């Protein structure tokens, strides 16, 4: 599967799933633009490592995905955007009547609004290039719910809905829009939830992982960032040219229950 000559912009890609997708895009031959809201030496080192190991061009561009103007500026600065991976995301867990307003606003801004802004900026470039792929990283929580994650679940259901609309608006063009719905993937976002969950359930780490976190994941295994990268690469391939406006679950059977 060759993505030679294509440019992939991956939001929120200095760690976790976004970084895993960037690696797989680069291994498939795409030039990559990494992003997060920081501007540390390590961020640029990640881009250099990808370029050195795969031979593609790789850059890191700082842009805060909680700010609409910066989302649009990221796409402008990238210059080309054949493949847009909307991946940036944060989480906060609290009952809805105690959910901090600023956390609600930040989650909706980063997990949902950013994809509106980047997609709006990228579509004209895709149209000009005559080819495009939008891949939104939603979640099993874009299709089902859990308590205490109101903002995240609202944002993820929202991005699944927006994906369908983008697909319909581009249906007669060589552009597709799809959402990947991962179950649990062991990344910093998930790792950060483990201590609180251990306290909440008064359990050890392994017990929390198997019986709480993976309780709804029948495979009892975390998905890997490489598997998500491979799924994103597949959605960018010719084989997936007629796959648009849909979701692909990578969740070990979670949504089959
Ligand atoms: P992560 O914390 O490792 O990565 C999140 C990325 O988003 C980081 O690169 C972070 O720097 C970036 N980010 C956060 N705020 C940002 C901002 N304001 N501007 C720009 N970038 C910002 O977590 P992850 O698990 O890799 O999550 C990536 C995506 O996958 C998220 O959308 C998340 O909801 C989704 N997801 C994760 C899982 C999982 O189990 N890990 C499951 C389903 C969906």
Image: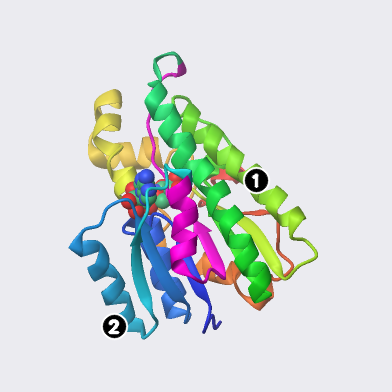
Disc 1: which residue? 162
Crowd around label 1: few <14 · some 14–19 · many ≥20 (10 Å): many
Circle 2 SS class = helix
Q: Mark 2 and mark 1 in contact (Cβ < 8 Å)?
A: no
Highlighted range, magenta: 69-96
Circle 1 SS class = helix
193 part of magenta stretch: no
Disc 2: which residue? 52
Q: Position of residue 167 (x, y in %)?
A: 71, 56
Q: Quadrant of residue 172?
A: bottom right
Tell me if residue 186 can be seen: no
Crowd around label 2: few <14 · some 14–19 · many ≥20 (10 Å): few
* Vertical position of residue 56 compared to residue 143: above or below: below
* Vertical position of residue 148 compared to residue 53: above or below: above
Q: 114 or 160, which is in the foreground?
A: 114
Q: 249 or 133, which is in the foreground?
A: 133
Q: Position of residue 27 (x, y in %)?
A: 42, 79
Tell me if residue 212 can be seen: yes
CA gap, disc 1 and disc 2: 36 Å
């Amino acid at each position: 599967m060759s993505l030679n000559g294509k440019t992939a912009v991956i939001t929120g890609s200095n760690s976790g799933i976004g970084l895993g997708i960037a690696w797989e895009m680069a291994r498939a031959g795409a030039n990559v633009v990494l992003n997060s809201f920081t501007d540390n030496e390590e961020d640029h080192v990640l881009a250099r490592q990808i370029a050195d190991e795969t031979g593609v061009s790789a850059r890191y561009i700082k842009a805060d995905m909680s700010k609409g103007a910066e989302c649009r500026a990221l796409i402008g600065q990238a210059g080309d955007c054949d493949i847009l991976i909307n991946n940036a995301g944060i989480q906060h867990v609290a009952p809805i009547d105690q959910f901090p307003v600023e956390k609600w606003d930040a989650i909706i801004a980063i997990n949902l609004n950013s994809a509106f802004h980047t997609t709006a900026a990228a579509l004209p470039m895709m149209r000009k290039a005559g080819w495009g792929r939008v891949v939104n990283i939603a979640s099993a929580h874009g299709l089902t719910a859990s308590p205490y994650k109101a903002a995240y679940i609202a944002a993820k259901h929202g991005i699944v809905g927006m994906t369908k609309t983008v697909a319909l608006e581009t249906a007669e063009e060589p552009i597709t829009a799809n959402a990947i719905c991962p179950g649990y993937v062991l990344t910093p976002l998930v790792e950060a939830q483990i201590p609180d969950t251990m306290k909440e359930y008064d359990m050890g780490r392994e017990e929390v992982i198997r019986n709480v976190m993976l309780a709804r994941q029948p495979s009892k295994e975390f998905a890997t960032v490489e598997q998500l990268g491979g799924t994103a690469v597949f959605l960018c391939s010719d084989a997936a040219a007629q796959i648009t406006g849909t979701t692909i679950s990578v969740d070990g059977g979670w949504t089959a229950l």
